[in-house]
C-alpha cells in the first residue's frame, strides 16, 4: 500500500537474508536445478523486483490531494487532528480531498464527537520513519494537536531500514507528540503481502518483514502511551480479498474505497484517544500505563 522502491533489493539484507539460503535451495529443487544457492535466489528476486517496477510505474504521480481544512465548522469547538507519516497518511491514491485518510477521519470524528475538526497533514509521500522528525519540525511553533495519527513503515521495509532504527524514530516522534500533550494513534506497517503486482517469493518475504516491523512498532508505541491499530489485522484482509476495489490505479495505494475502509478501521482508536468512546474492537491496542511521564 506504499510505493516500494525496488531499485535496491532489500530482501538481500536484514531480516529476510536469513531465509535466502533456504529459499535458494527450494527454488533450485522446484526448478530441477541441482546445487541451488542463495545467489540464485537473489537473482530471482532481482528479476522479480524489475518485473514489479514495470508493472507498477507511477500513474498517480507524487502528490496527494490537499485535504487540510476546517471540517464541519458549524459544530463549534474544534478538534485539532494531525496526520504524520508516508503516502497512506498523506492520502496518495485518493482522487478527492474528502476521500483521503485525513479527510475521512476528520468527517468521522465530527460525526461521532459532534465537534468541528481542523485537519493538518504533515505526512509526505515516500517518507520513512526517519523523516517523522522533519515533519514535526515544520509544524508551527506552539502547535499542539488534540490527536495525531501516524502511519509509516512500508518504505522502511522496502529500503531495508533495520527494524531497530525504524522503531527508534517512531518512538521519538511519539515522545515529541506526547510531550506536547497530544494523544497519539499509530497505524502499524501494512502487510506488503497484499501487493499482487509483486510476484512470489518476493511478496512472501515482504509480508514477513512488514509484519515483523508492525509487531515492533506496536510494542514501542504502547510503551510510550500511544494507542495502536494493527492495520494488517483490521483492514489487511479487505485488501487481500478485494484488491480491485481496495487499491487505486497503481495497485499499491488505497483507492477511495480503500481509504474509507482504513479510516473506518482506525476511527475507534482515534475516538477513544479523544475520550468519545471507551471500548475498541479487535486489532486495537491501548497502553496499560500512561506513557507521558
Image (cartoon, helix red, strand yellow):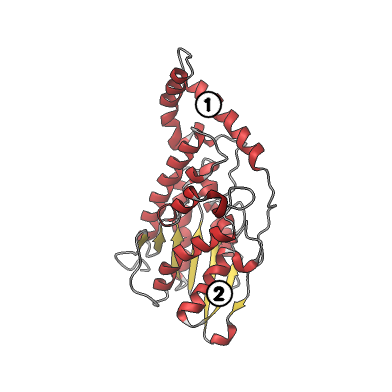
Q: Is residue 84 above or below residue 61?
A: below
Residue sitting farthest toward the left? 288
Q: Would residue 247 be found to the left or right of residue 278 on screen?
A: right
Residue that mark 1 sits on: 42
Which residue occupies 38% across, 68% down?
Answer: 292
**Residue at 47 percent of width and 49 percent of height:** 241
What secondary structure is marked by label 1?
helix
Residue of label 2: 143
State whether residue 232 appears in this view.
Answer: yes
Q: CA distance from mark 2 to mark 1?
A: 47 Å
Q: Is residue 79 above or below residue 22?
A: below
**Residue 124, quarter of picture:** bottom right
What x and y, as percent, mark residue 99? 60, 65
Residue positioned 46% across, 12% down in the render: 34
- Residue 101 coordinates in the image, percent (x, y): 55, 64
Q: Position of residue 165 (x, y in %)?
A: 47, 47
Question: Residue 217: image x %, image y %?
Answer: 41, 53
**From the image, which quarter does the C terminus lie in?**
bottom left
Give me the disc on residue 59.
none
The number of numbered badges drawn on the structure is 2
Question: Does the rendering let one see residue 86?
Answer: no
Q: Residue visible at 59% across and 84% down?
A: 73
Which one is nearer the viewer's eye here, 91 or 18?
91
Are the residues flagged by discs 2 and 1 in contact, CB closer than 8 Å?
A: no
Residue farthest top in this picture = 34
Task: State whether residue 99 is above or below residue 9.
Answer: below
First reached walking from the N terminus: tag 2 or tag 1? 1
| Callout 2 crowding tier (Cα within 10 Å): few <14, some 14–19, many ≥20 | few
Give the secondary structure at mark 2.
loop
How many other residues sit within 10 Å of disc 1, few (<14), some (14-19) or many (≥20)?
Answer: many
For marks 2 and 1, give the one nearer the viewer.
Answer: 1
Amino acid at each position: 500500500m506504499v510505493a516500494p522502491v525496488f531499485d535496491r533489493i532489500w530482501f538481500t539484507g536484514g531480516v529476510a537474508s536469513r531465509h535466502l539460503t533456504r529459499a535458494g535451495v527450494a527454488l533450485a529443487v522446484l526448478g530441477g536445478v541441482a546445487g541451488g544457492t542463495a545467489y540464485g535466489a537473489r537473482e530471482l528476486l532481482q528479476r522479480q523486483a524489475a518485473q514489479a517496477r514495470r508493472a507498477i510505474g507511477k500513474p498517480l504521480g507524487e502528490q496527494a490531494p490537499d485535504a487540510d481544512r476546517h471540517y464541519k465548522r458549524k459544530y463549534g469547538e474544534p478538534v485539532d487532528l494531525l496526520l504524520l507519516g508516508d503516502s497512506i497518511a498523506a492520502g496518495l491514491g485518493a482522487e478527492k480531498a474528502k476521500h483521503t485518510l485525513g479527510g475521512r477521519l476528520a468527517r468521522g470524528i465530527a460525526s461521532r464527537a459532534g465537534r468541528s475538526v481542523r485537519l493538518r497533514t504533515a505526512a509526505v509521500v515516500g517518507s520513512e520513519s526517519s523523516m517523522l522528525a522533519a515533519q514535526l519540525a515544520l509544524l508551527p511553533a506552539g502547535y499542539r494537536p488534540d490527536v495525531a495519527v501516524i502511519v509509516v513503515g512500508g518504505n522502511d521495509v522496502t529500503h531495508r531500514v533495520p527494524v531497530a532504527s525504524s522503531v527508534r524514530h517512531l518512538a521519538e516522534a511519539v515522545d515529541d507528540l506526547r510531550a506536547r500533550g497530544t494523544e497519539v494513534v499509530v497505524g502499524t506497517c501494512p502487510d506488503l503481502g497484499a501487493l499482487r503486482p509483486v510476484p512470489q517469493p518476493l511478496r512472501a518475504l515482504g509480508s514477513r518483514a512488514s509484519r515483523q516491523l508492525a509487531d515492533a512498532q506496536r510494542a514501542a508505541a504502547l510503551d510510550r502511551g500511544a494507542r495502536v491499530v494493527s492495520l494488517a489485522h483490521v483492514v489487511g484482509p479487505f485488501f487481500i480479498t478485494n484488491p480491485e476495489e481496495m487499491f487505486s490505479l497503481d495497485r499499491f495505494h488505497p483507492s477511495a474505497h480503500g481509504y474509507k475502509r482504513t479510516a473506518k478501521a482506525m476511527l475507534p482508536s482515534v475516538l477513544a484517544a479523544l475520550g468519545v468512546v471507551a471500548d475498541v474492537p479487535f486489532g486495537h491496542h491501548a497502553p496499560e500505563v500512561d506513557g507521558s511521564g
